Amino acid sequence: MVPRPTSPYTPGTMPVRVAIVDDDAPYRGAIADLLSLETSFQVVASFGDARQLLAAAAKIPPPQWDMVLMDIEMPGM
């Protein structure tokens, strides 16, 4: 068994809030599942395309996420 690297996350600090943007729903779910294994990340939003992300960002400023993981090869990019 390969040891997992230790996380730089310090208990008691806020996790990085992540928004996932990908046109493939199962892939978005898999990424969210993987990130949920790491306590330093919290998936707070999931979008099927960049337009949905931008619409959400315009409605609830400031954005409720710290980082966006986006598929840059999806249609419309």
Image (cartoon, rainbow, N blue to C red):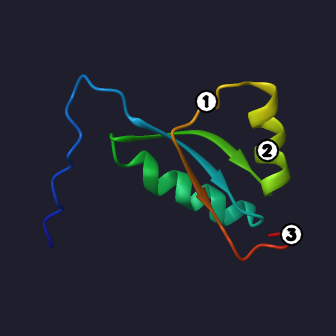
Query: In this figure, which residue is indicated by the disc labeled 2?
Result: 54
Q: Is mark 1 on a helix, strand or loop?
A: loop
Marks 1,2: beta carbons within 8 A: no
Residue 16: mark in rendering:
none
**Which residue is at 33% across, 40% downward?**
39
Amino acid, disc 3:
Gly
Q: Does residue 61 appear to the left or right of 13 in the view shown?
A: right
Query: In this figure, which residue is indicated by the disc labeled 3?
Result: 76
Q: How many labels does the image show?
A: 3
Q: How far apart are marks 2 and 3 (CA)?
A: 13 Å
Q: How far apart are marks 1 and 2 (CA)?
A: 12 Å
Q: What element carries label 3?
A: loop
Query: In this figure, which residue is indicated by the disc labeled 1?
Result: 64
**Which residue is at 80% across, 57% downward?**
49
Percent x, y for residue 15?
38, 34
Q: Does residue 7 appear to the left or right of 33 in the view shown?
A: left
Amino acid, disc 2:
Leu
In this rendered view, identify the residue nearer to me: 35 or 61. 61
Percent x, y for residue 37?
37, 49
Percent x, y for residue 20?
62, 52
Amino acid, disc 1:
Gln
Q: In which quarter of the image is the C terminus?
A: bottom right
Q: Earlier in the sequence, mark 2 or mark 3?
A: 2
